[in-house]
């Protein structure tokens, strides 16, 4: 599910590969991925643009636009992109506040950047190995998949990366390095 607060549109992805967009009463759009075998797992609106990026279960990314054709407003897929390989399976998505890139966290722990103008992968990659080299010894362990990515409000050069084994890193993109690190390990839960 995704929300565009400016255009006041809500999008819902389905297990059959459909995207339904709802606005005020009477405003409704529908799009269907060509391969309807795969569920829509994540949706991101590009704010105030009438554009949506969808991630499907087959690890494919799709750019959709709401356009007018022959006097009728339609939703159409305009570009697609895919990351290959098990370690590149997308596990988290974050839209940069600039709107230039999507940050794509993967099960392998790396973060890739998708250029939204070209819908091509950027050469900039935040490698998990580089993150691990830049944190104190106490926190060094295999962090696992990226579970969450968020920009620091007011400072888009810093992103918070949450890994599935409890490691959180405030990463400085301008001067690559960890500004802060925190880890919470749960050893056992008693009932």
Image: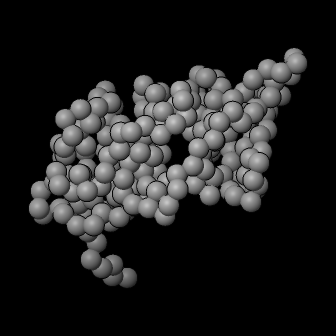
Residue at screen point 23% across, 60% down: 183
Task: Place residue 73 in its image quadrant.
Answer: top right
Q: Position of residue 24 (x, y in %)?
A: 75, 27
Residue 164, percent across and down?
37, 62
Residue at the (17%, 62%) spot, across then down? 139
Label count reads 0
Say whether residue 188 is left or right of residue 20.
Answer: left
Quadrant of the snapshot with the C terminus: bottom left
Q: Is residue 15 left or right of residue 70?
A: left
Q: With 72 as the anchor, is 103 left or right in this view?
A: left
Looking at the image, residue 169 lies above or below residue 85: above
Residue 58 x %, y %: 62, 58
Instruction: Give whichever of 117, 185 is nearer the camera.
Output: 117
Which quarter of the rendered picture does the N terminus lie within? top right
60 displayed left or right of 120: right
**How are the colours assigned in the image?**
one colour
| Residue found at the very far top of the displayed protein | 71
- Name the residue nearer the viewer: 165 or 102: 102
The answer to whether any part of residue 10 appears in the image is no
Q: Quadrant of residue 45?
A: top right
Instruction: Report whether residue 118 is seen.
Output: yes
Task: Kindly identify the residue that appears in the image at 53 percent across and 27 percent down.
Answer: 117
């Amino acid at each position: 599910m995704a929300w565009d607060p400016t255009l006041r549109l809500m999008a819902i992805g389905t297990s059959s590969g459909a995207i339904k967009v709802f606005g005020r009463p009477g405003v409704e759009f529908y799009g269907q991925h060509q391969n309807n075998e795969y569920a829509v797992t994540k949706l991101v609106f590009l704010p105030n643009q009438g554009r949506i990026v969808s991630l499907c279960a087959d690890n494919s990314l799709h750019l959709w636009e709401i356009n007018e054709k022959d006097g009728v407003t339609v939703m159409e897929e305009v570009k697609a992109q895919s990351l290959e390989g098990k370690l590149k399976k997308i596990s988290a998505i974050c839209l940069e506040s600039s709107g230039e890139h999507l940050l794509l966290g993967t099960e392998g722990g790396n973060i890739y950047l998708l250029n939204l103008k070209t819908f091509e992968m950027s050469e900039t990659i935040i490698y998990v190995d580089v993150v691990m080299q830049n944190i104190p010894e106490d926190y060094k362990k295999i962090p696992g998949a990226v579970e969450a990515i968020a920009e620091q409000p007011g400072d888009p050069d810093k992103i918070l990366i949450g890994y599935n084994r409890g490691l959180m890193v405030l990463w400085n993109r301008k001067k690559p390095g960890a500004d802060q690190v925190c880890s919470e390990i749960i050893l056992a839960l008693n009932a």
